[in-house]
Image (cartoon, rainbow, N blue to C red):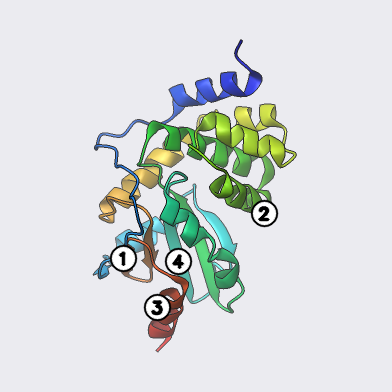
Amino acid sequence: MPTRRTALAGLLAAAAPSLSTPLLAPPARAQEAVAPHRIPTELAEHARTRPALVPVGDVGGDVVFVEFFDYNCPWCRASADHLDALAAMAGVGVLLASYPILSDASREAAAIALGVLAHAGPEVYRGFHASLFSARGLKDGTRALAVAEEAGLDVDAVGRAAALPGIAPALEDMIGVGRRLGFDATPATLVGPWAWEGYIDLATKRRIIADLRA
């Protein structure tokens, strides 16, 4: 017999955006970031103003990372562990960009995550974001709803929020932005006019901050 979470996740699976490009397999090991490429100013500014972005830290500061992630990407989870350290730096912020390009399950999880954001706001979302990354196994709509319930959230309200008409277009918009930035894998990062594809460790992020401020 289907459960409430399964039924909600099924609705979200039908509403999740479809991709015109092939899905990507999760990397077996850390993908180190390749050399950055410069992004036109207009495209970089467009990427930093999308409605699905979630702010962490001082996003009005002089250095703002836009971190593109997929909940089923293990190296996105490693990158998410840097959030507290980056947010603690003066003038540094992070904009979290859900970029569910690895599987249909990823798109379901992303829709639930945006439902948490719409229902409970960015502070609650941040805790959910960390918990979903820490959860074992495939992250799909059902797993994401279970994590929301474990966090004490009303899963019916989260499911309704995730099914709102603006959620799927917001995810499609973010996917389109990532493609225009040239991101074919996760994690990927935009900071200033520069875009990196692949995992960037915290020490390298600190060097990027120093270089941009030099």
Q: Residue at the spot x=56%, y=41% of the render?
A: 113
Q: CA distance from mark 2 to mark 3?
A: 26 Å
Q: CA distance from mark 2 to mark 4?
A: 18 Å
Kind of element beneath mark 1: loop
Q: Residues within 10 Å of mark 2 (few under 14, many from 20)?
A: few
Q: Which residue is mark 1?
A: 33
Q: Nearer the viewer, mark 4 or mark 1?
A: 1
Tag shown at residue 65: 4
Q: Nearer the viewer, mark 2 or mark 1?
A: 1
Q: Amino acid at mark 3?
A: Ile
* Whether residue 118 is situated above or below residue 35 in the rendered picture: above
Quadrant where the C terminus lies?
Answer: bottom left
Q: Amino acid at mark 4?
A: Phe
Q: Amino acid at mark 1?
A: Ala
Tag shown at residue 123: 2
* Whether residue 189 is situated above or below residue 166 in the rendered picture: below
Kind of element beneath mark 2: helix
